Image: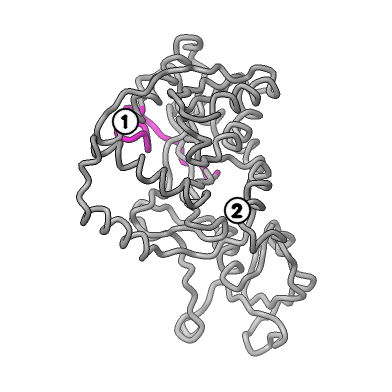
Amino acid sequence: MSKTKIYGFGLIKNGVKFDYPFMESLRSMAPLVEKIFFNVGDCEDETLLKIEELNKELDNKITILEKPWPKREFGHVLSEMTNYSLNELRKKHSEDNVWGIYLQSDEVLSERDYGQIKSDIDHAQGNGFDAVRFRYLHFWQSHFEIAIMKRWYPHEVRAVKINSKIESWGDAQGFRNYKKVFESDCHIYHYGHIRNENAYVDKMTEFFKLYYTGMRLKRKTWQYFVRSFDREKTLKYFGHHPEVMKNRIQRIEVKYRDTYSRVKGVNIVGELSKEFTPKILADEIFQVENFRDRNKDYPTVIFNPNNMQKLFRPSKVKDRSESPLCRPWPKDFVSLLKLSEKNIWSN
């Protein structure tokens, strides 16, 4: 039995106003941790009330830290407030076997990864690591599109050893001062760019205030920001989402309310893992050696294509995102994306 203890920490301000999935984030973290140290800023909405209600439901698992947020340029307030939560955790639990999982309030963990996350942190604890870095899925404007351009970080540290000098820095995207990091294949599901449209505009305006005090934001800078996101490259993602996100996805994605629909059949050219094949939502799966042998009534997905297939039947799906920092994606994840490209769901 593991002797490693895991706690959670995080922060939020105006989560209701800006339509953050902060409740889903907290719910996804709660089963993994013994306690959550959560910094709630001076809110203008019902965020604190919502967290207090959730805390009762979770038998007071959340230690609510009501801390007013100071004004800082360049987003430094986010790392400052993150470190406030982290240091409050350190004051209570500084033993060598204590780890902290950090989630921002638009980041969610999947229940399917709980066992592996615990195993990865146990491995890190037993082998001299002081941080664990997770892969990321950045959903863009839809729960069924992931952003893949190089500006999107493919992984980040989200678990740290508490008895260390590790701290959040910059705009709290990541941590520094770790000595040895373990690379996990578990995902952080990042939903920061999917929310109520009006709340999203308000959130982005507030976001820029963190970087330009007094809104010293030139019009051409804002226009460049908008244009750059208009050119965003994405891939279809018709796969699993954390269970805690189900109601939110159904609320936001009107045209996808009947998600995970099955197709009658699909042709598979190439090999799939035995673990992944049963996840394909198709009544019939036709495994064929050559493209010409396919059942023409159904879509065909080619795995491990040869040079001719790459030329005449190209796919937008590569083995990693465009970020030069991205490790190759696991084989089953590439399989999921190739099926998604053909509008085929995998669960």
Q: Position of residue 135 (x, y in %)?
A: 48, 46
Q: Is residue 219 in the magenta section?
A: no
Question: Label 1 to label 2, Cα distance in Å?
Answer: 32 Å
Judge by depth and name the residue closer to the eye, 23 or 297.
23
Judge by depth and name the residue closer to the eye, 51 or 240.
51
Is residue 347 shown left or right of residue 85?
right
Q: Name the residue furthest bottom.
A: 292
| Residue under the image location 37 percent in, 38 percent down | 173
Q: Is residue 38 visible?
A: yes
Q: Which residues are magenta?
A: 168-186
Q: Position of residue 269 (x, y in %)?
A: 63, 77
Q: Name the residue furthest top.
A: 92
Q: Is residue 148 above or below residue 299?
A: above
Is residue 78 shown left or right of residue 97?
left
Number of the label disc, if any, that sits on residue 169: 1
The mark closer to the camera, 1 or 2, is 2
Disc tally is: 2
| Residue under the image location 57 percent in, 36 percent down | 25
| Placement of the N terminus among the 4 image quadrants | top right
Q: Which residue is mark 2?
A: 252
Q: Position of residue 95 (x, y in %)?
A: 50, 12
For badge 1, the amino acid type reads Trp
Is residue 190 shown left or right of residue 222?
right
| Placement of the C terminus among the 4 image quadrants | bottom right
